[in-house]
């Protein structure tokens, strides 16, 4: 028989005469052949928790045609052994344009590797308390109070009774989440739904390879003074720089305190008096740095106390920092430290 007639990479050679040799020789090659030749094969992308690594792959996705709505959020993926348990730890699978969470430790039956998948409904967004960088993680959610009215009528007050159980990858960033943190989940008629983290479970999903963090979020009250509905981040303004003036309160809002070379960032100052009333007074911006000549930065006044700072394409600026000051009558009202980072 001609060599090119074989679909498998190399024909097995028997030396011992035992049936076990046939199992070992054909098991994995047979599944690889199925991925190469069968219409059951799906083209997918395997993705790490922070989306830093996206790897195209071939797989078989099962449980596609279920009969109930809840089951439609579940899938199973079959891949060659070692795909999900190798050096790179994948947390998500994307196929047909949809992101799915790998919800448990993969197992194998000597033929292929198998893992359960959960449909990701949305992205959980928060601002890191130390770096101020905005984090985004796809998650699967279940409304554990779906059969309740959404409120609890006590003897004195009416409280929200809506809770979500969510699953997301467990890594160095999500491990920093803690009880009491608040998150924006969605908007209802432009009113954000805000939930507070009331249960952190890093134990039951702490598997050997694929680690899953399980959280319980309970509905709380939206606070427009500290929550940013445009960015969908709760407690966003609470982490902004505080005013250094006793007469005024000044807050600097920004999407990120990092600007890449050959890019720009925008910053807006909000000024209020001690009673909380907004003051329509122009802010004077100035930039200071002990690390480089700030004249290489381009500042554009966008109006309404908003400026755009552009950083030129100079690799010598990478890693440098500068202070952006909002001043009034030569008094510094608020300051934010901005870092310059690489474009890629």
Image (cartoon, grey):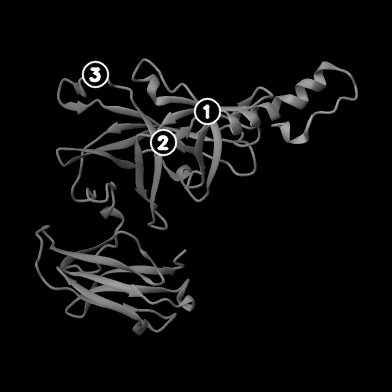
Q: Nearer the viewer, mark 2 or mark 1?
A: 1
Instruction: Report if residue 323 is visible in the image.
Output: yes
Splitting the image into 4 quarters, where does residue 302 fall?
bottom left
Label 2 element class: loop
Residue at image mark 3: 148
Q: Position of residue 85 (x, y in %)?
A: 63, 36
Q: Is residue 168 above or below residue 270?
A: above
Q: Crowdedness of circle 2 by 10 Å Cα count: few (<14), some, many (20+)?
A: few
Q: Which residue is farthest front?
A: 2
Q: Residue 96 — which label?
A: 2
Q: Nearer the viewer, mark 3 or mark 2?
A: 2
**Labels 3 and 1: the sequence-earlier one:** 1
Q: Residue 318 — which label?
A: none
| Residue drawn at the location 82% of the way across and 22% of the way down | 21
Label 3 to label 2, Cα distance in Å? 34 Å
Q: Is residue 344 left or right of residue 268?
A: right
Q: Position of residue 91 (x, y in %)?
A: 51, 38
Residue at image mark 1: 39
| Residue drawn at the location 49% of the way across and 43% of the way down | 49
Label 2 to label 1, Cα distance in Å? 15 Å
| Residue drawn at the location 30% of the way across and 59% of the way down | 255
Label 3 to label 1, Cα distance in Å? 44 Å
Splitting the image into 4 quarters, where does residue 94 fall?
top left
Label 1 element class: loop
């Amino acid at each position: 028989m001609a060599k090119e007639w074989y679909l498998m990479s190399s024909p097995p050679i028997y030396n011992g005469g035992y049936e076990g040799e046939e199992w070992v020789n054909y098991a994995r090659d047979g599944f690889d052949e199925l991925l190469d030749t069968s219409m059951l094969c799906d083209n997918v992308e395997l993705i790490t928790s922070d989306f830093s690594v996206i790897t195209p792959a071939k797989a078989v996705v099962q449980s596609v045609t279920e009969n109930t709505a809840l089951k439609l959020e579940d899938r199973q993926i079959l891949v060659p052994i070692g795909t999900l348990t190798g050096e790179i730890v994948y947390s998500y699978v994307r196929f047909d344009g949809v992101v799915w969470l790998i919800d448990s430790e993969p197992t194998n039956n000597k033929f292929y590797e198998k893992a359960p998948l959960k449909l990701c409904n949305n992205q959980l967004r928060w601002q890191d308390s130390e770096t101020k960088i905005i984090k985004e993680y796809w998650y699967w959610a279940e409304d554990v109070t779906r059969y309740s009215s959404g409120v609890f009528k006590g003897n004195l007050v009416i409280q929200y009774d809506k809770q979500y159980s969510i699953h997301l990858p467990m890594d160095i960033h999500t491990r920093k989440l803690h009880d009491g943190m608040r998150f924006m989940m969605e908007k209802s008629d432009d009113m954000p739904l805000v939930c507070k983290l009331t249960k952190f479970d890093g134990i039951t999903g702490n598997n050997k390879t694929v680690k899953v963090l399980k959280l319980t979020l309970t509905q709380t009250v939206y606070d427009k003074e500290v929550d940013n509905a445009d960015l969908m981040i709760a407690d966003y303004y609470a982490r902004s720089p505080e005013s250094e003036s006793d007469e005024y309160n000044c807050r600097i809002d920004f999407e990120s305190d990092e600007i890449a070379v050959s890019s720009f960032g925008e910053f807006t100052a909000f000024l209020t008096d001690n009673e909380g009333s907004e003051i329509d007074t122009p802010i004077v911006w100035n930039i200071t740095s002990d690390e480089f000549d700030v004249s290489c930065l381009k500042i554009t006044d966008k109006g309404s106390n908003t400026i755009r700072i552009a950083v030129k394409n100079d690799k010598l600026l990478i890693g440098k920092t500068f202070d952006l000051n909002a001043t009034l009558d030569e008094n510094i009202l608020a300051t934010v430290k901005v870092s310059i980072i690489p474009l890629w």
